[in-house]
Image (cartoon, rainbow, N blue to C red):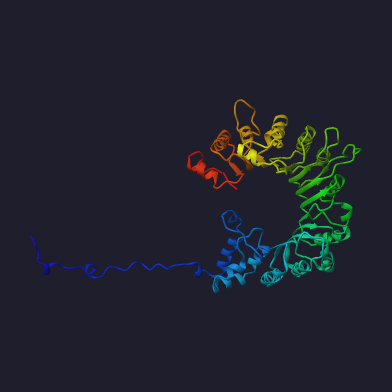
Amino acid sequence: MAFPISTVTQTPEASSPPPSPPTVSRMTINNLPAEILAKIFTEYIYDHSLERAGLKPLTGSYRRVAVSKGAVTSPLQLGHVCALWRTAVFFNPGLWSHLYVDRPEEQDAELLKLWCKQGRSTWRHPLYLTFIQKGTIAVNSSGRDLFWQCLEESMRWRTAILYLNADMEDLITDQVSHLAPMLQAFHLNLYRWPHKAKQRFSERLLSGPFVWKGAWSAEIPFSVSTFHSISWSSLSSISIGWIQLSDLLEVVQLAPNVAHLSVCILFEPPSDLGQPSSPHRLNRLQWLEVTNPWSSPSQPSVLQFFLDSLILPSLTTIVLRPSKLFYERDWLALSELVDRSGCNLETLVWPRRPTVIDSIAFELQGTESPQCDVLEQLKYVSSNFEALRTGIRHLEIQCKTGRRTVDHLTISQEEEALFPSLRSIKLQHCVCVCHAGARRIEQMRESRQPTLVDIDVGSTGDISEDPFETWRSTGILGADRFFACR
């Protein structure tokens, strides 16, 4: 039956217009408060991963006066975008708290002055300073003037990394009585400075109540007699570039609270060194980095003597810098140190060492340098010292490695496992950049399951694309693997 149109009752909903869509507020970065913008800018400026994102580093004055080495932007550049950004940048001293001055020139004076002014609202705002002077013996008046600006901010210094020539000595001497009262850490490279000037500068920096870290580069041999009046007890981290064994032993006795000790160059002992006295106990030392200087099997071993002189119950990490081969006596001394101390040594780091061999050839071949003895050394340790073999949980190799290293780190039934309890492996310069190398790395990972949880592989060589991305796309590696390409 058909109904007349007039008899159909229309509901109000049918007669009313359709509802309008809900209003969506558009939030842009310019709607954010200046404090939030400042936090975003801080994350952006100090994000060092941007250096690997294809962004070009700064040039000119912006490169020589920046937040860090290789910076890709600066607070001043962000402040040029608009008025809102300028407010966020220039009214937040925290954005200007890091100052990296690298071989400044006269035309950088205005930028450096502005940088110091923006972070100077109160002395409580910290300044983390790095100042690297030009490598010249002659007096550089422009460098002196620029460093003077940084000295005027010493009340705000929290860290100070200073590479200074001898012409800066008188500036420091004039300011030394009231220098850096809030300092927490410093690193000094004082080229051609007199011993007394270096001593006075170090003593003043160490006199602050908050200093916990001191580092001296290897510009001249470090002598404890030069720093006889320094208080070492407050330092928990000590790094020395060049020191004689007898001085190093004196340092560890004067620094009972040290937790991090690093020595880059260790002198050979005299031939009549004899046997070490009763071992010295350092209850808090957790991280030890030491060099094994060149010596023949018939000569006394500096490393052996040093390790035999210590008891380190808290030691967890050791970094061994080989200048030549490690002999059986050196590894034996390390094993005996672990047994004597009852420590839980978990991390072994083998740093990169310089070599005169042209590495291009063996990188292309996927093989290792014939002068790189790291694999044979690690095989020897793992085979002969059970405490080290089963105790090491984290292995980091910073020198160049290849297929042989990956193959020996793969657990198989034919050979004894190399450090079977590893939970993390880091190969910083691996030359396995082809698919065959990727398969080897994957086989190594699978052979160590479920113990191994973290792999960090850094490729070497001039490659146009990330090889690990290719491995994932071809199904060789899953997306959940812990691989990094640097």
Please state the horizontal and vertical placement of residue 483, each as a whole percent of the image.
Answer: 57, 44
For the residue pair 47 and 342, the one nearer the viewer reads as: 47
- Res 257 seen here: no
Using the image, determine if residue 79 lies above or below residue 270. Answer: below
- Res 146 seen here: yes
Question: Which residue extends farthest bottom?
Answer: 83
Question: Which residue extends farthest right?
Answer: 272
Residue sitting at x 65%, y 28%:
416
Please state the horizontal and vertical placement of residue 95, each as a whole percent of the image.
Answer: 63, 66
Using the image, determine if residue 98 lies above or below residue 311. Answer: below
Quarter of the view holding residue 68 = bottom right
Question: Which residue extends farthest left?
Answer: 1
Please state the horizontal and vertical placement of residue 54, each as a whole percent of the image.
Answer: 56, 55
- Residue 410 appears left or right of 20: right
Quarter of the view holding residue 456 = top right
Residue sitting at x 32%, y 69%:
20
Please state the horizontal and vertical placement of residue 303, each as a whole percent of the image.
Answer: 81, 40
Quarter of the view holding residue 66 = bottom right
Question: Which residue extends farthest top?
Answer: 414
Q: Which part of the image, by quadrant, shows the N terminus?
A: bottom left
Using the image, determine if residue 341 lies above or below residue 199. Answer: above
What is the total number of numbered labels drawn onto the structure image? 0
